[in-house]
Amino acid sequence: MGPNLYITMERDPKLKSPCNMLFKYAGDTNLAVPEITYVTLSDKFLHINEWANHNKMIINESKTKEIVFRRPSPKRLYMFPSVDGIELVDNVKLLGVILQNNFSLEIHVTYVHLVDMQSEYFSKEA
């Protein structure tokens, strides 16, 4: 099953817009969509779902998140999710790095510092 699944995952779904980018690592797939595009995010997500169904794969929608990156500003605007049933979040963890929607690294730095302090504490205990 391994080689067959690898070949299926390597065959990217054909994107509906040439300005989109697809990033894959192991079992994770990330779709980057620019602000200005002629295809809605809902249509793009539906297209990827159809590709997954055709290849007998299931997208775990409970793990699927949407994040909208924007310039930092004092105003906080409320946005609605673009795809029904998909959670709109302020930060995501991608390959061990926590990305925030305002391009800040504050949460990631805090997390790395906490992990470092915990490992230091446990190494002293041993």
Image: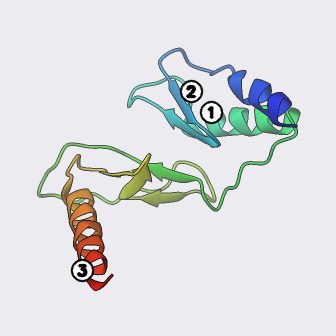
Residue extending furthest toward the front: 126
Q: Relative to 118, is 83 on the left or the right?
A: right
Q: Nearer the viewer, residue 113 or 83?
A: 113
Identity, as a three-letter code, of the amino acid under mark 1: Lys
Count of numbered labels shown in the rendering: 3
14 to 25, vertically: above or below? above
SS of the residue under disc 3: helix
Task: Give the spatial CA distance, label 2 vs label 1.
Answer: 7 Å
Q: Relative to 20, is 2 on the left or the right?
A: right
Per the image, the residue denoted by label 3 is 124
Residue 17 is tagged as: none
Per the image, the residue denoted by label 2 is 39
Identity, as a three-letter code, of the amino acid under mark 2: Val
Mark before the other along the chain sequence, 3 or 2: 2
Q: Nearer the viewer, residue 112 or 57?
A: 112
Per the image, the residue denoted by label 1 is 44
Nearer to us: label 3 or label 2: 3
Q: Nearer the viewer, residue 43 or 121?
A: 121
Q: Residue at x 72, y 30 (%)?
A: 9
Residue extending furthest toward the bottom: 125
Task: Give the spatial CA distance, label 3 vs label 2.
Answer: 55 Å
Task: Give the spatial CA distance, label 3 vs label 1.
Answer: 51 Å
